[in-house]
Amino acid sequence: MNFDVEWIREATLELGKIWMNSPDREMVGRAAVELERSMIEDAAGLGESREPGMRIAFQGPLIVTFWVNEQVKRALVLHVRERR
């Protein structure tokens, strides 16, 4: 049940800013890789459901908001925030 995962530019920039400002860049990088891997495996089952099609997931220091289209097996990462 693999999904195609795409990050919009804003989400990529948000992740980059978090990574640049983190005292533990390795942890941020690992969390981002794990989130993407989990989305590829089953984006529709990852994290918590929000409004229709929208989900939120937590991994290490990161929180991602993403949209899922189950019919075409696609996930679109919209925002990345730092979990405090």
Image (cartoon, rainbow, N blue to C red):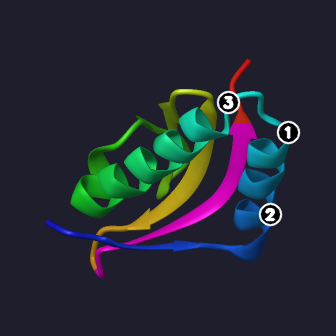
72, above or below 37, in the image: below
Residue at 39 percent of width and 46 percent of height: 34
The residue that label 2 is drawn on is 13
Residue at 49 percent of width and 32 percent of height: 59
Left or right: 22 in relation to 80: right
The residue that label 3 is drawn on is 24
Mark 3 or 2: the one toward you: 3
Residue 41 point in image, percent of width and height: 22, 58
78, above or below 58, in the image: below
Displayed quadrant of residue 61: top right
Left or right: 45 in relation to 19: left
Q: Nearer the viewer, residue 72 or 36?
A: 36
**Residue type, mark 3 in image:** Asp
**Residue type, mark 1 in image:** Asn
Quarter of the C terminus within the rendering: top right
Give yes or no for contact between labels 1 and 3 (Cβ–Cβ under 8 Å): no
The residue that label 1 is drawn on is 21
Q: Badge 2, how many Cα within 10 Å: few under 14, some, many 20+?
A: some
**Residue type, mark 2 in image:** Leu
- How far is mark 1 from mark 2, CA to CA? 12 Å
* Mark positioned earlier in the residue sequence (3 or 2): 2
Mark 1 or 2: the one toward you: 1
Residues in magenta?
72-81
Left or right: 74 in relation to 18: left
Q: Nearer the viewer, residue 41 or 65?
A: 41
Give yes or no for contact between labels 3 and 2 (Cβ–Cβ under 8 Å): no
Displayed quadrant of residue 62: top right
